[in-house]
Image: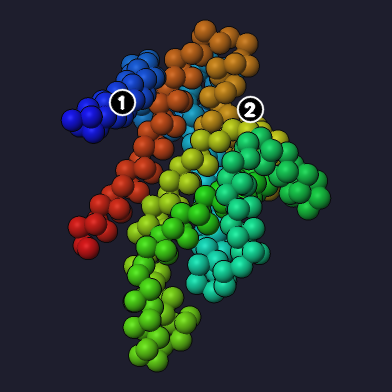
Amino acid sequence: MIKKIKYLLDWILLLGSTLLVCLILGVILWDIFSKGMSSVSWNFISRFPTDGMTEGGILPAVIGTLLLTFITTLFAVPFGVACAIYLNEYARPSALTNVIRASIRNLAGIPSIIYGLFGLALFVQALRLGTSVLSAGLTLGLLSLPYIITTTEEALKRIPNSMREATLALGATQFETIKDVVLPKALPGILTGVILTMSRAAGETAPILFTGVAFYINGITASANQEFMALPYHLYMLSTQHQAIEEVKPLAYGTATVLILLVFILNIIAFYIRYKHRTQD
């Protein structure tokens, strides 16, 4: 009887906590969407800002965010996946590998603004890349690496060792086993982690603040060596730094709505990949 009561209380506590979090999230989303959807239109997405950011759209910020995410993915995914494959498939258990894994997990907890300062020192100043979308993308790539390594390694760990042993017994090399058996099975989990990490990186403001983002650019960023506009920083400027905050508040809510929708789309893609993987299994 006591165990049943304890189980019921635990269940009520978990359910109540979940409902409380969902309620708070729902209130936040309702506030943003109710005030921002009226500003979102094709003209808002496809036009340039005008009249000191009080009119027009957010096209340069959308293009800059997509370009930034592409550079981040191009840099972080190959290195992150390769590192996870080495740690899980090649590295022998030792104190060194334990230290490496602990360091990777600690890096995931470092505030993003620290990555911004490190990117400023390394990419902008030391490597002389200047304030550009390339410097910002590489900085976000460093921020994303710990998450990609961790999620990829967890996806690889879920593959049974019996599959590896069976392939090796048939005469395949370890590299062939990883390439033809392990990676295809782990690919949905890897892609899910990568997409979720990229959706998080797309909403970061602090790392790009020091490395290349600009308040306004007269045109679209087409080169990796140029400064750029991005949705998170554009939203920050409209909400806190603009000389007519009340006047541009509808545009700020519209920008927040577009950014949230972009992140939602990336998350839905990740969930769809996970769902397809489960149905196939």
- Measure the C-alpha gap from mark 1 to mark 2: 45 Å
Q: Quadrant of residue 243?
A: top right
For the question of whether residue 91 can be seen, the reply is yes
For the question of whether residue 223 can be seen, the reply is no
Q: Residue 122: where, in percent of width, then height? A: 76, 49
Tell me the residue at 34%/83% (across/down): 166
Describe the element under mark 1 as helix, strand or loop: helix
Q: Quadrant of residue 227?
A: top right
Q: Is residue 34 left or right of residue 241?
A: left
The tag earlier along the polypeptide, 1 or 2, is 1
**Which marked residue is nearer to the observer: mark 1 or mark 2?**
1
According to the picture, the residue beneath numbered tag 1 turns out to be: 13
Give amino acid for label 2.
Answer: Phe
Q: Residue 44: where, in percent of width, then height? A: 42, 26
Tell me the residue at 51%/9% (across/down): 247
Q: Is residue 35 left or right of residue 200?
A: left
Tell me the residue at 34%/25% (across/down): 17
Q: Is residue 204 left or right of residue 277?
A: right
Q: Residue 21: where, in percent of width, then height? A: 36, 25
Q: Residue 5: where, in percent of width, then height? A: 22, 27
Tell me the residue at 27%/59% (across/down): 277
Q: Quadrant of residue 210?
A: top right
According to the picture, the residue beneath numbered tag 2 turns out to be: 215
Give amino acid for label 1.
Answer: Leu
Residue closest to the far bottom? 171
